Amino acid sequence: MAWRHVQFIEEIGQTRPALPLIDIQVAKSNGTIPMTPPGTALPFFNTDRWLMRSDVCKHCAHAPCHEACPTGAIIRTEFDTVYVQQDICNGCGYCVVACPFGVIARDEQETHTARKCTLCYDRMKDGLEPACAKSCPTDSIQYGEVEELKKHARERLGLLHERGLNEARLYGVDDNILDGGLHAFFLLLDEPEVYNLPSNPPRPSNNVVPASLWSILAALLLSLCGFLFLKK
């Protein structure tokens, strides 16, 4: 449970004129994946495609799970990642409901604590890159300094737009998600919702102050009513 699986989205028969997925030669020139054998392009195949995304913790700059944790079990490491200390977590589950991406869960089978992607904290302490980035054969998953990765992502996005992939977009780079952005961001080929990503994820902590104020006001009103009742 320390990491999440790759998410696959299958799109069949959708009209996407900006995505000419024909054969290997055309696909290479467009930087896309061929969906038909060479020289056998068929119109009704040209719109079929698979979308893939690594469903990992986003290691948010201002992580809601970090804010919601009442025990201090969730910390920000020296690498600016978000990490759950298993020996401190009491399994309350506040972080689970606070995460707008659903990437943290409670281990109901063994530890009964909250678990999520650690970005291979143990490997980073030894000067190694996370296992997912190390093992990715296409460099689709990359690891490095956040600003350098953002720069590379913007360049890649510009290249895709030049090739006609106008629906391509970055998620978590320049959109200031959760009032600070994400430290694990994505290059998408469609709307965020297609990938089960919220376009404007809510920040649960924003509701804490208003809810607390209403609770205080309600308590004051009840106290006042009790005082008046006793006075009569």
Image: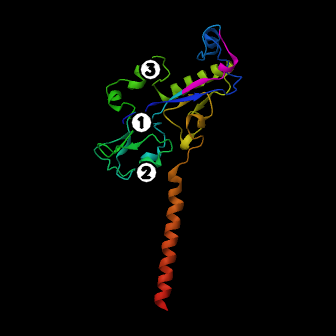
Q: Secondary structure at mark 3?
A: loop
Q: What is the distance, in whole Å, between disc 1 and disc 3 at their CAs?
A: 20 Å
Q: What is the distance, in whole Å, between disc 2 and disc 3 at their CAs?
A: 33 Å
Front residue of this view, candidates 107 and 48: 48
Inspect the image, locate mark 3, and give the three-letter code of the amino acid beneath it.
Cys
Q: Nearer the viewer, mark 2 or mark 1?
A: 2
Residue 232, x across and y down, in percent: 49, 92
- Give the vertical position of 99 relative to 123 (above or below): below
The residue beneath circle 3 is: 136
Sequence-first tag of 2 and 3: 2
Residue 41 location, quadrant? top right
Q: Secondary structure at mark 2?
A: helix
Mark 1, Cα crowd under 10 Å, few <14 / some 14-19 / many 20+, is many
Sequence-first tag of 1 and 3: 1
Quarter of the rendering occupied by the N terminus: top left
The residue beneath circle 1 is: 81
The residue beneath circle 2 is: 68
Inspect the image, locate mark 2, and give the three-letter code of the amino acid beneath it.
Ala
Front residue of this view, candidates 15 and 78: 15
Q: Which residues are magenta?
A: 40-51
Give the number of the disc on residue 150: none
Are dots 2 and 3 in contact, CB under 8 Å?
no
Across the whole image, how many numbered discs are drawn on residues? 3
Q: Nearer the viewer, mark 2 or mark 3?
A: 3
State yes or no: residue 46 in magenta.
yes
